Amino acid sequence: MKRKFIYICLSMSLFSCQKLDLNPLSQGSSETWNSNAEEIIMSLNDLYREALWKKDADEWTDDWINRDGLTDITNATINGQTGFVITNWNDTYKAIARANTVLESMDRAAGSLSESQINMYKGEARFIRACMFSYLLSHYKNVVYTDKTLTIEEAMQIGQMPPEELLKKIYEDFDFGIANMRESFASNELKRATKGAALAMKARIALYMGDYATAKTAAKACIDLGIYKLHTDFDNLFLSKTKQSPESIFLLPRSISLGVALSGRQSFVSRNAGGWAQFDPSWDLMFSFLGSDGLPIDESPLFDPKNPFANRDPRCAATIVPFGSAHLDYIFDPHPLALKTKKVSTGADVNNNDNRAVATYASFNGLIWKKGVDSDWLLNSWRVEPDNIIIRYADVLLMYAEAKIELNEIDASVLDAINTVRARAYKVDKSAAGYPKVTNTNQAALRTILRTERRMEFAFEGLRYMDIIRWKLAEKVLNRPNYGLLDPGDLVSKVVNTGKWFTPTAPDIDTDGLADIAPFYNQGLVKQIAIRKFDANKQYIWPIPSTEVLTSGLKQNPNY
């Protein structure tokens, strides 16, 4: 941690034509750098490196299955030596140190820039610092706060700040950014964080910390800017071809040519298309999508267990590939008797490698991801370049609604926010017919509706983990097995031949919107793939890295 506090880096920008390097060799002079707008912008751009902006992994949640594999979180083995615990701590403090360096040197530009211009840039740096401390607070809770560069001796003397005090510091930084950052950038300008981003991210950390009044106010202020709107088509919002949607409040652009891309996408792609179908959506997620009548599937008369994608919220088929549909030039069909499938472009019958009777390592539960996946994923050595959306307008709308629900301030604006998001999924206006409009005003019922809406809307976007953490649902959902298909022979004899494909009935959905799949297992109709575990005595916050406890005297979090 000592080196993180004093690390100074003034490298070329994220958006330059150079390949990203987290530890660049070139550094500006600490005596003269940031004396003009160009140098300040270069320093700020360096803070937008993707490696510094941490997202939670979907594989840490109940939305995910990785064959029979588990993670340190889903196996309850997380500790102070876990790789991502150390890396995320180090990289986040690295960003904080760089932001502090920029802030301390920015007044050198006083001769060439006005006070308002300098404050605009300071607001951006403080916004970034607030985002980084928000991540540390929400994940590690008991962390060290610093708003300046420190000597090694000074760093050694700093203790952990109480979480409630750190939250105040975070709010101060966000508020400075809100007061001084730009609302927007011209079409020909490089787009960085804005006032709306500061409001949205302030609302997020406030919601995470249970400060619903602040979350409500910040989210409403972001909405009232009138700048953002939902992307018209949920299905293509997440594709590489969709750049800088008006729904994206804060994003990091990606570019294969500039070396900033998602890699290793083969694990998410169907085997017919040349992928591995290793990382897949869980049955827990698939069963959570409501029926097209707005009811949970165990209450909806429209749900067909033999055709589970029919009559569902459109985001179900936009997130998970429906059986019998065309996907990446093949008809996707995991049915154990479908030994052949069709290649769409040629009409030819080919071996169905997405059937476990043909390919042993086809999806273990018969599901594969569709959200954001298109033919671009098959190119460029499995690298893709969709925008890295940090926060989008749908999140702000649902955060506003959630905060108002938790405050029991339920009014028309709450229903309007939820219905705006839901109507977009159905491609209709919120005031129109043609979608299951939310009208219930009961607090407990709305809480379940809101949580289900978030799950349907944000699957595969890295938000589910903090949702189950802050709702204290992790101990419930992550102490359940991950279920999948029986082995092919048993699947045919016990499920297909008895008329129970895909499931015999709808699973029961509880008041948290969670499916109970255990009865299918007890009937011998499904298989336990992996036994997830979550230790509620400690896992709601992460451990402090062991090296910091041993060398810097920091106090370890409870029960680690």
Image (spheres, grey):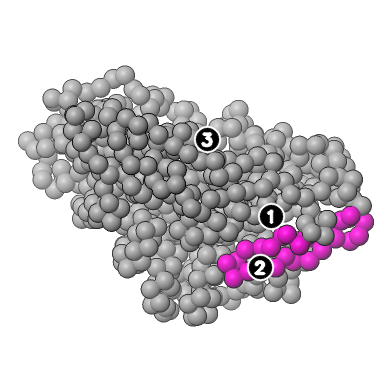
Identify the amino acid type marked 3: Leu
Q: Which residues are magenta?
A: 494-520
Does residue 518 belong to the magenta stretch?
yes
Question: Is 168 above or below relative to 10?
Answer: below
- Percent across and percent down for residue 445 are 53, 76
Residue 262, disc:
3
**Residue located at (64% from left, 73% from top):** 295
User: Which residue is located at x 48 percent, y 61 percent?
Assistant: 471
Image: 236 above or below 414 = above
Q: Which residue is mark 2?
A: 509
Residue at disc 3, secondary structure: loop
The quarter of the image holding the C terminus is top left
Question: Dot 2: within a 10 Å radius of its alpha carbon, few (fewer than 14), some, or many (20 or more) residues?
Answer: some
Q: Point out the tag, 1 or 2, that comes first from the N-terminus.
A: 1
- Could you say where residue 430 lies in the image, as x and y percent from the top left? 51, 72
Numbered disc 2: secondary structure: strand
Q: Tell me which corner region of the image, top left, top right, bottom left or bottom right, holds residue 287.
A: bottom right
Q: Which mark is residue 283?
A: 1
Q: Which mark is residue 549?
A: none
165 sits to left or right of 545 = left
Callouts 2 and 3 close, C-beta under 8 Å? no
Marks 1 and 2 close (CB-CB < 8 Å): no
Residue 65 point in image, percent of width and height: 65, 46
Q: Earlier in the sequence, mark 2 or mark 3?
A: 3
Residue that protrudes farthest toward the left in the picture: 111
Viewer-nearest of discs 3 and 1: 1
Label 2 amino acid? Ile
In the picture as drawn, the residue positioned furthest to the front comes out as: 559
Classify 199 as above or below 390.
below
